[in-house]
Image: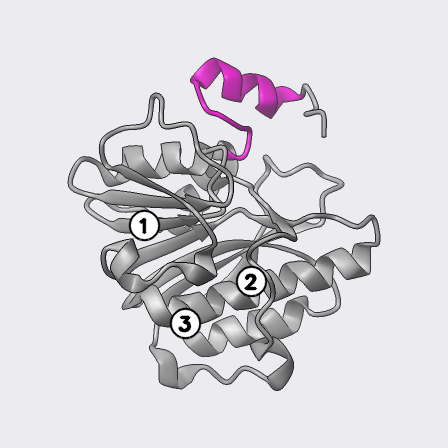
Amino acid sequence: MKEVQDHWFRKAKEDGYRARSAYKLLAIDERFRILKRGMRVLDAGAAPGSWTQVASKIVGERGEIVSVDLKPIDPRGLPKNVRLICGDLRQISLADFGGYFDLILSDMAPDTTGVPMADAAISVRLCNALLDLSKEVLKVGGDLAMKVFEGGEYLELLARAKNIFCEAQGYKPTSSRAESVEMFIVCSGYKGRKFDQATTATRVKPPLGPGWKSGG
């Protein structure tokens, strides 16, 4: 898909970011302060790496960003506190990740079908998979920020996130295109596995292999 030559696209080029999506994470962090020095962060669906660029700078040398994508991420220009993994999130163990995370980031989205309701439903299933992943790799008290397409299942997803985290709310950065249905759910204070009250529908694990595309 050809990128639109808009303000944020041009600014990303000028500032050295790999994609305009960098400004979405910068806006999220300005609003919610989810990134802190010394954190371990998982960037899920990280290619081409603009969210990794933002996060690695903020966490500093004592922090670490583990960036995962099915597509190889170009390591050139990334700092030493970034570790790249090419693979499917479902097939990577906690040991492979190197331990628990303070924060999970996700700008990934499904391959769109052109049918808004279907695309939104798939997006919600991807997010539910990330909530499942949180139970495996996120520290108690940790945070999560993930992209979702608004649709009929959005409120159910938000309700599940509120069960698992102390706080969860939707947020749309100004750098998101006005016509876009994307929303970011920002969750803080992971409570632990026992607080998940997902329905049978949300527990169905969607593919994190083919069927989703990178975002950050």
Residue 191 percent location from the top left of the image: 34, 76
**Image marks 2 and 3: residues in contact by CB distance under 8 Å:** no
> Which label belongs to residue 41?
1
Q: Magenta segment: does it hold 8?
A: yes
Residue 77, by quadrant, is top left
Could you give the CA–CA distance between mark 1 and mark 2, rounded to whole angstroms? 17 Å
Q: Which residues, given as a range, are shown in magenta?
A: 6-21
Mark 1, other Cα within 10 Å: few <14 / some 14–19 / many ≥20: many
- The x and y percentages for residue 34 are 35, 51
Q: Is mark 2 on a helix, strand or loop?
A: helix
Where, quadrant-wise, is the N terminus in this rendering?
top right
Mark 2 crowd level (few <14, some 14–19, many ≥20, 10 Å Cα): many
Kindly report the distance in space between the C-alpha atoms of the residues bearing marks 3 and 1.
Answer: 17 Å
Q: Look at mark 3 in the image and give the residue it sits on.
A: 165
Type of the residue with mark 1: Val
Of tags 3 and 1, the one toward the viewer is 1
* Residue labelled with disc 2: 127
User: Position of 212 compared to 15: left or right?
Assistant: right
Circle 1/circle 2 CB separation < 8 Å = no
Q: Which residue is drawn at 46% across and 62% down?
A: 90
> Between 152 and 131, which is closer to the camera in this rendering?
131
Q: Is residue 161 above or below residue 103?
A: below
Badge 1 marks a residue whose secondary structure is strand
Q: Residue at x 49, y 46 (%)?
A: 45
Q: Looking at the image, which residue sits at the far top? A: 14
Q: Residues within 10 Å of mark 3 (few under 14, many from 20)?
A: many
User: From this viewpoint, which residue is outermost toward the right?
Assistant: 115
Q: Is residue 32 above or below residue 19?
A: below
Q: Can you tell which of label 2 and label 3 is closer to the viewer?
A: 2
